[in-house]
Image: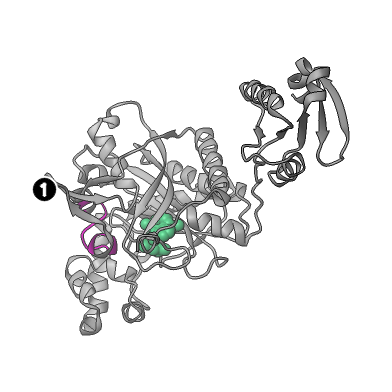
Amino acid sequence: MLTKAPKGTKDLLPEEAYKWHYIENKFKDLCELYGYKEIRTPIFEHTELFQRGVGDTTDIVQKEMYSFQDHGNRDITLKPEGTSPVVRSVVEHKLFAGPQPNKFYYDTACFRYEKPQAGRLREFHQFGVETFGSNDMLADAEIIALAQDFLTKMGITDISLRINSVGCPVCRKEHRKALREFLEPKYDELCDTCKDRYNKNPMRILDCKSPVCQELVKGAPVMLDYLCDDCREAFEDLKKNLDSLGVTYEVDPGIVRGLDYYTKTAFEFVTDAIGAQGTVCGGGRYDHLVEEVGGPETPGVGFGLGKERLLLTMEACGAQIPEPSDADVFIAVMGEEAKGAGLKLMQDMRSEGIKVQMDVMGRNIKNQFKFANRIGAAKTIVIGADELARNSFAIKDMESGEQIEVPMEEIINSLK
Ligand code: ATP
Ligand code: MG
């Protein structure tokens, strides 16, 4: 136990970390390009936030949350998703009062007690984006275009966008009625969780992971057939905007999403390249979540994009991530006096932004060169008694083997 990370968690080792830096930097740059600003919220929140926000008949709230009481008897939950905490923050800091829209992005760990498998962990990481304040389907289309743009920039080719409308509280009533009628003869066969959902929120049954329930809901009435005029118009608008943006999509009436807060727009980017857990990005509109959390009526739309699944998909698509070298320059030294000169030179070089290393293992000169090769240094500088006496050092190009002699005071300039 002591030497094994908890089930469903993973260490990020240096051999992988550079890939994470790469996607994180690219995501941040793209969000800023689209006019989004970063927001960071705590890793845990009051449990009630997720019960209210995500919905108490969802799998997340019923089965997957890491919840506990702290020493002050507060009910606390490690965030299972990123949107509700951002909404809480918007309400707490009255960000709805300023100029609209408010556009945020985040990069966060999430926690869900799920069955770990490829692309499914208990601690996982998400990029997310949220726009607040706009009822216009332009906001939805922009969010989708941003996700699409990012996935393309990451070298992902094998992915498709599916869109749907999950309606609003008005038209959902009709759909709910139809759904109950459809499921009534099958009620006894539903899993226990879904029996409860039948009364409270039958739409959640469509999202149940149990194979029996999945079979039972085949052919069930779909929300798209029950949209009110407002929701239908919005969906047509969304499609028009996506067409204008040149984003290709497929309408998939089966998308319901695992969180209760969605209204109207729901979408997923799905790939076949990484096995069963193929949803890389999912999102949609949530017009009543801000009110649910205690703020004024403020519409919102956003997405979450799983970093682990993104990296798996990039790998499957053969996307290249440039691997940084450990050092651009290595200083090889012979003798005590040379060590001192090497140290000083190393420090001067670092203050000029040159990536440089020196031996700290007491290696002989031959092994220092071997080490320089191993860490991928492009140049090696040799300092020994002769070099010190001449006050000029040899710079060796590790690839060509070519060597030039450079006066000490010109070393840094010649490297730059
Ligand atoms: P799924 O249907 O695969 O369970 P979800 O609908 O529960 O996904 P969301 O809540 O929409 O997922 O989260 C957004 C994204 O976060 C997903 O598209 C996925 O990339 C990622 N994600 C969700 N759960 C996990 C997990 N347990 N492990 C790794 N990534 C996850
Ligand atoms: Mg899930």
The magenta segment: 51-62
- Residue at the farthest top position: 409
Ligand 2 in which quarter:
bottom left
Side (left or right) of 254 relative to 93: right
**Placement of 71 over or under 381, stated as above or below:** below
Circle 1 residues within 10 Å: few <14, some 14–19, many ≥20: few
Examine the rendered structure and indicate whether residue 273 appears above or below residue 15: below
The location of residue 213, given as percent across then percent down, is: 31, 78
Is 143 positioned to the left or the right of 224 in the image? right
Instruction: Give the residue at x 76% y 34%.
Output: 380
Q: Position of residue 99 (x, y in %)?
A: 35, 26
Please give the name of the residue rendered at 52% of the width and 44% of the height, measured from the top-left corner.
146
Q: Is residue 396 visible?
A: yes
Q: Is residue 187 above or below residue 122?
A: below
Secondary structure of residue under mark 1? loop
Magenta stretch: includes residue 53: yes
> Can you say which quadrant of the picture contains the N terminus?
bottom left
* Residue 357 position by quadrant: top right
Magenta residue check for 161: no
Which residue is drawn at the image coordinates 54% and 66% (left, top)? 274
**How far from the left and from the top, in percent, is residue 414?**
79, 22
Viewer-closest of 357 and 335: 335
Q: Position of residue 49 (x, y in %)?
A: 21, 48
Under mark 1, the amino acid is Asn
As drawn, the residue found furthest toward the front would be: 336
Looking at the rendering, in which quadrant would you find the C terminus? top right
Q: Is residue 267 visible?
A: no
Q: Is residue 206 left or right of residue 170?
A: right
Q: Which residue is mark 1?
A: 73
Quarter of the view holding residue 400: top right
